[in-house]
Amino acid sequence: MDEGIELSLTIAQIIQRLRGSHLHSQIERQAKECLHQPDVKLESLKEDVRSFLKTSGWERKLQNAVYRELHIQLPPRHPPAPPEHLKEPLAYMRKAQASWEKRVLKSLNSMSTELGVPLAHMRPAAEQKELTNKWNEMGTDEPDLSRFRPVYAPKDFLEVLIGLRNPNHDSSEDISARSHWGLIQVPLNVRDIPHLREAYSELNLTSGQMGIDDHALIHPDLFENEYVQIGKKVVMEEDSAAAQQYSRQGCPTGLRADLWALILNATNQPQDVMHYEQLKAGVIQHNLLVDNLIYKDVKLTASNDDYYFVFEDFLYQVLLCFSRDTAVLEHFKYNSATPPKSYIQGKVGDEECAVVYPPNGVIPFHGFSMYVAPLCFLYNEPSKLYNVFREMYIRYFFRLHSISSHPSGILSLCLQFERLLQTHLPQLFYHLRQIGVQPLRLAFKWMVRAFSGYLSTDQLLLLWDRILGYDSLEVVAVLAAAVFAFRAENLMEVTSLASAEAVLADLSTLKVMPLIQVFLFATAM
Amino acid sequence: MEAVKMMQTMTPDDTKPVNFTVKAPVYLQIGDTKADTAHSGVCVVDVNLPFGKPVNIEEVTFKNYYTAYVTVRLLRRNPEQEAPAKWCTALRDLPLMDNPHTERGSQDYYTIHRTQMQVEPDHVVCVRLILRQPSLAWLTFSLEDIKIFPHTEPDPEKEVSDWLSDLTLIDQHPDLEGLPDPQTVSSSIQQMWALTEVMQTNQTTASIGRFDVDGCYDISLLSLT
């Protein structure tokens, strides 16, 4: 398509999305109020208002909002492409996602029927009052969750990914030129080290990195001091795009919270706080079966983790509200998944009674709370924490548990991990296969959680800096391969699945940036 | 103005695709066709436009199915001259998949506009699409849903004044199909500020937030269809 037309389409789409938003009305109000100022003259009204908006920082806020829209916007398409094509272009993947969803829904339905717990119902007034009083200490509750089980675990999802086949793919024995030793049998485009070196050039051996060059033994004047100064300037400028570029080399601990909020354009204005309060009211009013799944997940994962158990209450406050947030439904335009549908009061077929369940369309699975837990180290205000998490979910995390051909989707990450391993550590891969171990089965649980709960928190945040900086989850696959490279010697000596698992059980001492840097830039080609 | 005209002709609402017959795709083989079990890597699809009614092509749209490259050849008959119709190449080896062995682009929708063609696609009698898929990874490849849109002369009335016609477009097509051109986008943003009251009556995409129906959210079973 012609570039000029593409640009017009993109601009028109963004205008439509920002029109009527709170930012739009704020800027209008500012523009009207500035008319009182003496330096705004009638003859040069347009230029004066524009320069006022620029100097007062409103133009920058608008730029950040536009930049955010560009992150989640679908590329403009000529009219023939139907909406499902925008969610996922490959028909067989859409089908696989639909049948996986059906399995999950059936599982949820049967859980509801067996336990005799309705999927959703209004809380009695007394219970509502109790919950309001206990809002800040929901962790002290010890409800009986023994009957509830997670709807699915990552390993169930892995089996679905392994079973995916393209009906048009020729997998006859003759095709041996590109034999693939791994589990993923779908020929997606994934990048190899030469391409990754170009794309991740800021991580090369000659660039300073947070996570390497801020080490206590290195004099801060060599890198850290200057880098922190630049970071402070970026935060002051309030520029999303600059913050994203900066984050590629990592964020200093003291500036990370502000930088991430800038990159994600997650503000904490009165309307955001009000929105959060509205969600809280939704939690108090209605009791969802999904809430029990959230409770159980938090109790099983975050509460048992040495780093995150202190944040248990925050996790409930964020995740329960997340389930009630209909704003999340927007992301299904570019997510291959579809929100589950239901009818209130059993009025099946009556479209007036059709609703989405849960209200945000996302059914949590085992380990879901680990997406939120690391953020608790950065934000202690619930509505700010909530906004940052929600934006991270609709930009990145949703790709880790849906079937899609997107380069940041979990399927591409799995294939990329396997390809990197086979290409650059063929002896290791071969050895593991000889003893009956498929490397993906060991690495999948790390990737599905973007390593949350497996790395120490400071290292995890350095990894997530790069996810934000490069707007891609590829570093997760690269790190998984780098971990295998690092522990290759030990892995070459194991002779069973159990010992392989033992070698890779504890990642808490790993330093992620040196591993990634060496794997990308020091691997012999 | 050019961009505005182009976009007006782009909307399928206004222009109907040309009716044509597509002959069965012919997969080419080297050597003995019956003995050969190797996959063919080249396929020829002939699109015969209605007899006696040559078309001036605006654009060709199709949905890809694992074709790596497409070449477009046109059989044009000049109505004035008595000379027989001649074949020419409009586009050679347009890549549809950036790697023939992998999925990207394999099921995407494509448009080939007349401006992308190397010759003027006027007085076209037949369109020949030559599909190539050199990779052995796929069992079959083709193009689906081929549509050819005729070139229509732009309506002279619409040239009245840029901003007036663009405002009309915004009113009539609140979704993507009525679009201002790049120059007028910036002027209409400033006009938006002045016309706030009018804009507020249009639909916005801001969400409302209620998930219940009149306060009720009692659900017993999820719908599986």
Image (tube, coloured by chain):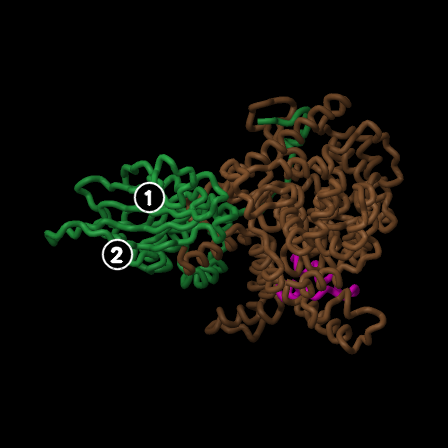
- Chain letter corresponding to the colour brown: A
Q: Nearer the viewer, residue A46 or A247?
A: A247
- Is residue A395 visible in the rendered structure shown here? no
Answer few, some or many: residues within 10 Å of disc 2's Cα (few below 14, many 20 plus, some between 14 and 19): some
Specify the quadrant that holds the N terminus of chain A: bottom left
Q: Mark 2 points at which residue?
A: B120
Specify the quadrant that holds the C terminus of chain A: bottom right
Could you tell me residue A98's position as x and y percent?
Answer: 58, 33
**Does the magenta run of residues contain B166?**
no
Q: In which quarter of the image is residue A290?
A: top right
Q: Which label's residue is closer to the chain start, 2 or 1?
A: 1
Q: Which of B110 and A349 is in front in this view?
A: B110
Q: Which of A242 and A178 is in front in this view?
A: A178
Q: Is mark 2 on a helix, strand or loop?
A: loop
- Return the mark for residue B44: 1
Q: Residue at x 39, y 51 (%)?
A: B169
- Is residue B51 visible in the rendered structure shown here? yes
Q: What element carries label 1?
A: strand
Display colour for chain B: green
Q: Residue furthest left?
A: B82
Chain letter for mark 1? B
**Are labels 2 and 1 assigned to the same chain?**
yes
Q: Residue at x 23, y 47 (%)?
A: B55
